[in-house]
Image: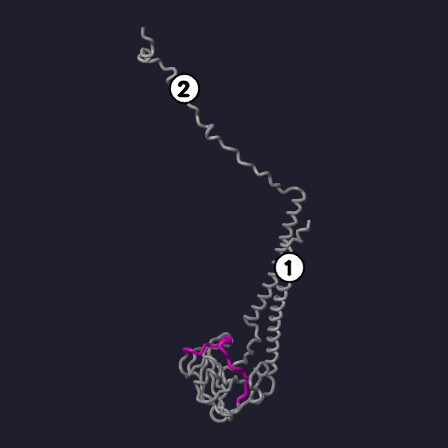
């Protein structure tokens, strides 16, 4: 009954199934592993952020360049505040507002962007408090420069003078007349009635949309594997039923080819001319009889 499994057609089906199911399981397991890695990164980043907030500050020079290990650590640097800018479109506790960013000119000749706090509402330079004068010591969480892919970051285009879309050295290079560190700091304690901005997690360590996309892809690959197995059983069952019906003689046997019956012969169908019944029983014409009768 199962001899059909040795046919070339079923050899091809079986090879496809044997290769497709492990491939789908492998891809699903890989996507699941990506999701678990993101969960672990998120947990690690949260624990690191809590430790960094309690750790003693480290000189800025010892934490550069910023990476996943140094991002969020408390940095300490001295300098004088310079130009002040506003960063609109920033949310805090689901409320719209803006950052107050002031450039801190250090003794190295470079300036460090310092987010001194957050204010609700529309960005307005008249609402932003002035920065302290003279030499100051700044302590806050070190952050990497933002990129266009960072969640919640406004694009830099179309902003009025004195406002900034992204906090990065590339965005500040045309706004300030001095070199800028490729990093920024958010103060532990905000100045003059503003709210302190918490340190953001490094990119790729949060449970964002990409993380849940990995989880969705995991389910899709396992569904594909189940669908391949379902279709194989369905084809097998249909083939077994067909073979069983053939053994029991339940399949209709093809009958002999019937030749078409010959049609009527056109010559035989042509009527033979015969006597005209209308003239056969008609009375004789007296003139004709007179012509044909013998004369005496």
* Nearer-the-camera pick, 286 or 236: 286
How crowded is the residue under tag 2: few (<14 C-alpha within 10 Å), some, or many (20+)?
few
> Where's residue 296, x and y in %?
31, 6
Is 60 contained in the magenta span?
no
- Magenta-highlighted stretch: main secondary structure? loop
Q: Is mark 2 on a helix, strand or loop?
A: loop
> Where's residue 252, x and y in %?
61, 41
Q: Distance between the residues labelled 2 and 1?
A: 85 Å
In the displayed structure, 212 sits above or below 291; it is: below
Is 142 contained in the magenta span?
yes
In the displayed structure, 90 sits above or below 220; it is: below
Figure label count? 2
Task: Name the residue: 57% across, 72% down.
Answer: 207
Which region shows up in magenta?
Answer: 138-158
Taking the view exactly as shown, the residue that stands out farthest to the front is 296
In the displayed structure, 220 sits above or below 280; it is: below
* Nearer-the-camera pick, 2 or 63: 2
Q: Which of marks 2 and 1 is in front?
A: 2
> Where's residue 245, x and y in %?
65, 44
How crowded is the residue under tag 1: few (<14 C-alpha within 10 Å), some, or many (20+)?
few
First in sequence: mark 2 or mark 1? Answer: 1
Residue that carries the numbered disc 2 in the rendered image: 275
Residue that carries the numbered disc 1 in the rendered image: 15
Tell me where residue 43 sits by quadrant.
bottom right
Q: Residue 103 got which mark? A: none
Task: Name the residue: 44% across, 84% down.
Answer: 85
Q: What element carries label 1?
A: helix
* Nearer-the-camera pick, 110 or 288: 288
- In the image, is 291 to the left or to the right of 199? left
Tell me where residue 291 sits by quadrant.
top left
């Amino acid at each position: 009954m199962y001899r059909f499994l040795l046919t070339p057609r079923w050899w091809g089906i079986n090879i496809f199934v044997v290769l497709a199911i492990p491939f789908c399981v492998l891809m699903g397991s890989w996507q699941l592993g990506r999701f678990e890695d993101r969960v672990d990164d998120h947990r690690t980043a949260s624990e690191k952020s809590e430790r960094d907030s309690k750790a003693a500050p480290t000189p800025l020079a010892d934490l550069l360049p910023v990476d996943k290990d140094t991002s969020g650590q408390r940095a300490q640097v001295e300098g004088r505040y310079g130009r002040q800018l506003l960063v609109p479109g920033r949310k805090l506790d689901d409320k719209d507002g803006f950052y107050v960013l002031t450039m801190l000119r250090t003794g190295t000749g470079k300036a460090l962007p310092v987010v001194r706090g957050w204010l609700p509402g529309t960005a307005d330079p008249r609402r932003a408090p002035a920065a302290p004068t003279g030499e100051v010591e700044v302590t806050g969480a070190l952050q990497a420069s933002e990129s266009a892919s960072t969640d919640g970051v406004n694009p830099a285009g179309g902003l009025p003078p004195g406002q900034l879309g992204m906090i990065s050295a590339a965005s500040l290079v045309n706004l300030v007349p001095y070199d800028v560190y490729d990093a920024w700091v958010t103060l532990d304690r905000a100045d003059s009635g503003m709210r302190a901005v918490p340190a953001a997690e490094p990119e790729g360590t949060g449970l964002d949309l990409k993380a849940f996309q990995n989880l969705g892809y995991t389910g899709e690959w396992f569904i594909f594997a189940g669908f391949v197995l379902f279709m194989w059983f369905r084809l097998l069952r249909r083939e077994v039923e067909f073979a069983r019906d053939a053994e029991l003689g339940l399949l209709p046997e093809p009958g002999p080819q019937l030749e078409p019956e010959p049609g009527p012969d056109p010559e035989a169908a042509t009527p033979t001319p015969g006597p005209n019944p209308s003239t056969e029983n008609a009375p004789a014409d007296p003139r004709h009889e007179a012509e044909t009768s013998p004369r005496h």
